[in-house]
Image (spheres, helix red, strand yellow):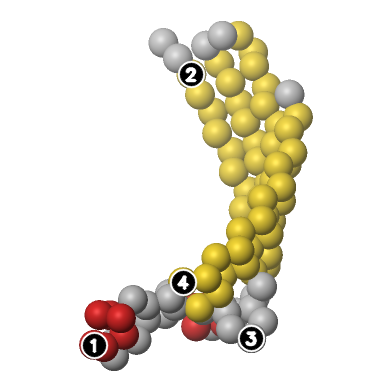
Amino acid sequence: MVAARFEYLNEDVTEDADTAALMLGSSAVGKTKLTSYELGANYWRSKRFRASFNYVLNHFDRSAGATPFLAALPSANEQEFLFRLAVAL
């Protein structure tokens, strides 16, 4: 089986009045925009054996207003290669 997935996240995190009054600052406050693409392949040998391979590309929007954590990332793209092997006894 071959499958594809697309996700888009657009979130704006703010501090409530009590937290802002403490003036601690947070690296999570700001806008987070993430676009994620995934392509996966599954192979079933039997009902007890399965192998999966997935490739994920995440793209973070680091434009003005982005959270300080995202702005500090060395690259706007992050890639993942996932391999899973499942055996049921």
Separation of marks 4 and 2 at Cα, in angstroms? 41 Å
Mark 1 vs mark 2, foreground winner is: 1
Q: Is residue 4 left or right of residue 33?
A: right
In terms of depth relative to the viewer, which is nearer, 66 or 74? Answer: 66
Q: Which numbered disc, 2 or 3, marks the residue that appears first in the sequence?
A: 3
* Foreground label between 2 and 3: 3
Q: Amino acid at mark 3?
A: Ala
| In this view, the mark in front (4 or 2) | 4
| Residue wearing tag 1 | 22
Q: Quadrant of the C terminus?
A: top left
Q: Gap in Å between the C-alphas at discs 1 and 2? A: 52 Å
Q: Pointer 2: residues within 10 angstroms few (<14), some, or many (20+)?
A: few
Q: Nearer the viewer, mark 3 or mark 4?
A: 4
Q: Position of residue 41 (x, y in %)?
A: 71, 32
In which quadrant of the rendered image does the N terminus lie?
top right
Answer few, some or many: residues within 10 Å of disc 1's Cα (few below 14, many 20 plus, some between 14 and 19): few
**Which residue matches tag 2?**
87
Report the residue at 68% width, 59% height from top: 35
Taking 42 as reference, is 45 above or below it? above
| Above or below, 3 relative to 16 | above
Which residue is at the front of the view, 25 or 55?
A: 25
In the image, what residue occupies the spot 62% across and 67% down? 33
Instruction: Residue 16: name its quadrant.
Output: bottom left
Q: Secondary structure at mark 4?
A: strand
* Residue occupying image coordinates x 58% and y 83%: 65
Coordinates of residue 31 in the picture (x, y in percent): 55, 74
